[in-house]
Amino acid sequence: MIPGRGGDPDDTRWCFAQVKGVVEVNVTEADIISTVEFNSTGELLATGDKGGRVVVFQREQESKNQPHRRGEYNVYSTFQSHEPEFDYLKSLEIEEKINKIRWLPQHNAAYFLLSTNDKTVKLWKISERDRRPEGYNLKDEEGRIRDPATITTLRVPVLRPMDLMVEATARRIFSNAHTYHINSISVNSDYETFMSTDDLRINLWNLEITNKSFNIVDIKPANMEELTEVITAAEFHPNQCNTFVYSSSKGSIRLCDMRAAALCDNHSKFFEEPEDPSNRSFFSEIISSISDVKFSHSGRYLMTRDYLTVKVWDLNMESKPLETYQVHDYLRSKLCSLYENDCIFDKFECVWNGSDSVIMTGSYNNFFRMFDRNTKRDVTLEASRENSKPRAILKPRKVCVGGKRRKDEISVDSLDFSKKILHTAWHPSENIIAVAATNNLYIFQDKVN
Amino acid sequence: MDVSAEAKRIIALSLTKLYGLRSQRGGFGLQRSLLLSLVMKSARNIYHNSRVIIESQESGPRCVEELTEEPKAETPAAPCPPAEGEWKPRLSRCEKSKENKENQGPSRLDRQSRKRRSKTAGEPDFLPSKRARMETGEEGKTVSFMSGGVNWCRAGLTSVPLGIVTPGSSGSPPSCLASPRDLQLAVLVPAALELRDA
């Protein structure tokens, strides 16, 4: 798969770099990774899990002694972001599962990220401490208060080096603004505001202010019996701080301009592809529901993921997508079974590579797919422990749809639907990808020649 | 017949899932509930439509006349393409005209009287009586289910007792959905869920 550097695509292939997490027969629910995100430089990689924890990995400095081995990602910080809560009024438990993590751009030595569960967004500061002050006048070395009567001289405390300590502190807590479950957060390019999105509403916050938030989209009908669609995802434009998009469960995307009105219920653009009547079934509504929407880095394109396809839209063309890629069309005839086992409700995410030339999304059986927009070639790869030897090249996988199954192919009925790749991330500038497979995080890199 | 059996199965499955949502940790998701109700609506439309086709085949032209006389029919002639097994959206319009008769107009009293009629016919055991529901304290659960803001449950739940689904696994439909009349009670729930079309 072309990593964006140009040249013959056959030269570049993906290989295994690292895997994080333990191998368990029965996976602990709390360890299931629920979100993955690189920061803007790619130096840090954050994961959130169902247990409300955030683990941040940092890339090692590349060493000159081993030039073929790019920097590894090692644990930098782990903290409990959200705890389970109970809404006494509604008698409902609020899950601690981290739905999304978004990094803020870096301004100083500390790192900042936003993490959210169903109801509350938190701003976390991750900072390093490698020095501590020694030589207090009023405290002794153990920290006990000294009797002032015993102090005969004064000294100035000095900073002495200590073992590196990385601490995470919650700097802001943005709560009580969402009646429904938060599914997205997005930091604005003005670096002052961000938005949080639930099923029916989108709220705009200032990063500094936690007791006020502005509602910018509200699709709740006056009569809930008339509800026909919900918001499934939303994102700010990467360059234009006034523009954002949100996707719906009906398969449409609305682009809104905040300059037009305070409440952006009227969209500026409406992207929807008419449904193919030959594909109509009981489950048409479910599979057309958009599970993820992402702007390209350039801001020119939009990518959406529904159950069976990934679509790339040109912002200037609302009537139909520019490109449509079939992720796993062989599941179209299995929709009833997938409805029975709830897999049809799985929400897959999609990502762009740094140059917007390749897109990636997950599938079942721990497969993930990459589509090269220029060459129109695609590849299916697998995240598995069997392919976990260092720098082992990943072999393309193929699903056999019908007829005779070739030796290396896997038949549709043999796919393991409990192994799903919902969350993936692509380094902002290099060909390094992070793939979350249940409770394991795989990191793959393109082969360096 | 395959279509209607499949539709019945999907309705039952959807109901199981909908009720299962109530006990889910984190409260019920609005999106999942909406999608489930949409599937149930499609399945119910298909099922009713296939029943209409069967009845029209059995009773001859009488059925077609009933449909054409339907005042609320969205298409004037209300043709019913008899193609069984074809799941065209157009079919649902014809069937919906019959549904509207069911769902509009009738007051609560009428609904209850309809229910009582089928009760005399022999209520299936997966539908316990309303009395039993209140005794088991299901009301409280009803409130919490609706508290997420989806009010459509109320009408449906009061017309059909909560104990409708006795799930073993979430995937298995109740085996007691034996007759179309049983299903009529089951679809009173989705009738309440029916989202008005534009």
Image (cartoon, helix red, strand yellow):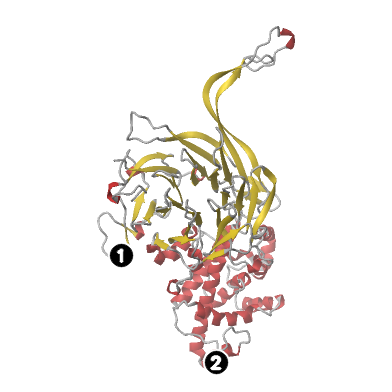
* Circle 2 chain: B
> What residue did someone put label 1 on?
A402
Chain ID of residue with mark 1: A
Q: Quarter-wise, where is residue A265 in the image?
A: bottom right
Amino acid under label 1?
Gly
x, y percent for residue A404: 26, 63
What secondary structure is marked by label 2? helix
Where residue A295 appears, x then y in whole percent?
A: 50, 54
Q: Which mark is residue B49?
A: none
Q: Nearer the viewer, mark 2 or mark 1?
A: 1
Which one is in front, A194 or B181? Answer: A194
Amino acid type assigned to the residue bearing label 2 in the image: Arg
Q: Which residue: 35% across, 60% down?
A: A412
Q: Residue at x 40, y 59 (%)?
A: A327
Answer above or below: position of A412 versus A166. Answer: below
Q: On the rendered structure, is A412 left or right of A425?
A: left
Residue at the far right in the pictured view: A149
Name the residue that disc number 2 marks.
B62
The x and y percentages for residue A58 are 46, 35
